[in-house]
Amino acid sequence: MKTDIKIFKTPSDLAEKLALDIVMRINDSAKKGKILTIALSGGSTPELLFSKLGDNFSKSARWEFVHFFWVDERCVPPDNTESNYRMAYEKLFRKIDIPLCNLHRIKGERIPEKEAFGYSEEISEFTGSRRGFPVFDVLLLGVGEDGHTASIFPGNLELLASNKICEVAVHPVSGQKRITVTGKVINNAKLIYFLVTGKAKSGIISRILNDPQSSQSFPASHIASVSGTVYWYLDEEAGRLYNMKSVVKD
Ligand code: 6PG
């Protein structure tokens, strides 16, 4: 497994570069006539990326060759301000020409246990499989200040080893139920991009990247693509405490 850490001056520089990287992968896949599966995270960090994709590439990416999935979703209706789908729709999907059937929304309004099963089935139907688990071509992750990723929180490390594709998780502070893909699905992805910005994340980033051994309690520390590359796209604020010796400046 390869790790590639890139630090950008600003969140905007990071989002512009990552948007370009993603669009290049989409168009390369389209040239081969192949569908590209991309699993998105939610939260606030990806908003800028989604806006750049929608504002700058609505006409230059072959969106019809992309199937979008989610890494996790809050158990709320799609019009709820907490919905990851709603955020992605507002920032990206309403600006591009993509068939609705290419957007595989986690139905947060359904009974969580039923949706966890149903979404597992939907993922399996549209993705390849390897080692018994679905394979996403590209998967975008964020990191919480507590070291969670997707909706795998500290204290729920068992979700990293689950043999299910999706599970129901509970946010440790709000108690909000979530649907999340599990660690084996995440690590099965061909390309994993961590997207982390802001000073508040500098501590967790430093612990995860500088001292993986002592950060085993953080779910994000356990993310390692079994066959591809994990990219860490950081802005200078999030990367400020990271050991700069081995940083690839962009
Ligand atoms: C979610 C995300 C979650 C997110 C982190 C970071 O549903 O909230 O999938 O894993 O990536 O919590 O969130 P921020 O980008 O808001 O800091």
Image: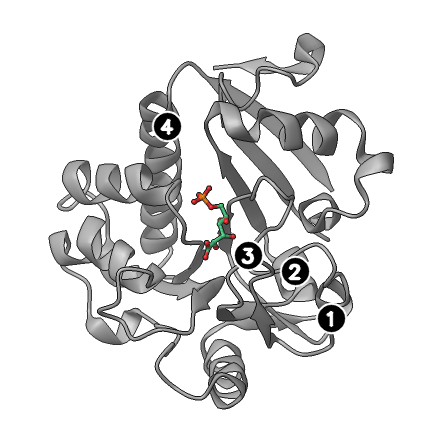
Residue under numbered circle 2: 188
Q: Residue 86 lies in what quarter of the image? A: bottom left
Q: Are marks 2 and 4 in contact (CB under 8 Å)?
A: no
Give amino acid for label 3. Ala
Q: Earlier in the sequence, mark 4 or mark 1?
A: 4
Dot 2 alpha-carbon crowd within 10 angstroms: few under 14, some 14 to 19, many 20 or more: many
Q: Secondary structure at mark 2?
A: helix
Q: Earlier in the sequence, mark 3 or mark 2?
A: 3
Q: Earlier in the sequence, mark 1 or mark 3?
A: 1
Give amino acid for label 1. Arg
Of tags 3 and 4, the one toward the viewer is: 3
| Front residue (pair 225, 201) | 201
Of tags 4 and 1, the one toward the viewer is: 4
Residue under numbered circle 1: 131
Residue under numbered circle 4: 17
Q: Are marks 1 and 2 in contact (CB under 8 Å)?
A: yes
